[in-house]
Image (spheres, rainbow, N blue to C red):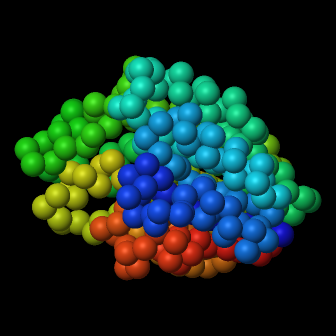
Amino acid sequence: MKIGMISDLHVDINQKTLEPNQTALSLIIDLVMKHELDILLIAGDISNHYKESQLFIEHIQTATKAEVYFTPGNHDYWSKDHEVKDTNIIDNYFMSKQQSLVGKPKIINEKWAIVGTPGWYDYGYGDHDQYTVEQFEKKKYKFASWNDRHYVDWGVDDQTVSKKMLKQLIKDIEATEGRQLILMTHVATHPEFVVPLPNRIYDYANGFLGAKSYEYLYDQYPTIKYSLMGHVHFRKTFREGDRTFIVACLGNKRHWRHKNFKAQLEKTLVVIDI
Ligand SMILES: [Fe+2]
């Protein structure tokens, strides 16, 4: 069983990096077929429009034999380019789709399952000696500003959203009955994937990169063998014991070594065989 992993394709922002005869969709379809993937996992941030993101994954699934699973990222929830301002409506839209893992983990076989949640930042990786929870909640402090404050509205605070998603994820993990797990989140859930502090900008901005409270899952559930996350816009894989942590973010051009979408996409995709 071959499983491909990728995130942060940002197909709208990256449109300008494509050659005239290319589309992000056709390039990823080619890649799924080339690797003969059975499953493709996308850990969020396909685009700034929820319908475009959903259509994108449905097109991949129709054009290839692969099943696609998706955990939305903060950009997929953005309301910048449409009128749906209540983020909960977009969340319900994604959860109603076949490609969502929330409340319906993918049982692969007797041995393996996939669980996932977007996950939401809980400010845990920020520097709490310097900043209060209220300062993180404002998502703006002097030179640092986090644009979700304009385009995401859950109606409750971020820490409440983060906790609610974690609670559901624990339920979903329990439902896999001891199978070995691939966990997929959009936000970072391991300190290795946030910026080491102190750092002038990230003392504050790290608060929005991940959910530190989710680290508890790694102690609690040794069955998590792979953990895929997105959001941080770089690429890195490392092992801790018999667990592999993966970030496979395409991100945007200023984070690329190859200044060409196709070449960078090929470098970014991680494929595992289970
Ligand atoms: Fe992103």
Residue 38 falls left or right of residue 252: right
Tell me if residue 8 comes above or below residue 57 in the rendering.
Answer: below
Residues 178 and 95: in front is 95
**Quadrant where the image shows the N terminus:** bottom right
Q: Is residue 122 visible?
A: yes
The residue sitting at 53% across, 27% down in the picture is 90
Relative to 110, 162 lies left or right: left
Q: Is residue 168 left or right of residue 16?
A: right
Q: Is residue 173 visible?
A: no
Q: Position of residue 192 (x, y in %)?
A: 41, 70
Q: Quadrant of residue 92?
A: top right
Quadrant of the frame with the C terminus: bottom right
* Quarter residue 169 falls in: top right
Nearer the observer, 167 or 273:
273
Please name the residue shown 90% across and 59% down the image. 109
x, y percentage for residue 243? 63, 72
Q: Is residue 59 left or right of residue 267?
A: right
Above or below 260: residue 110: above
At horizontal 78% and vertical 58% (from top left) the residue drawn is 64
| Residue 133 picture location, percent across and down | 25, 37
Observer-nearest of 241 and 48: 48
**Which residue shows up at 18% across the image and 66% down it?**
198
Q: Quadrant of residue 231?
A: bottom left
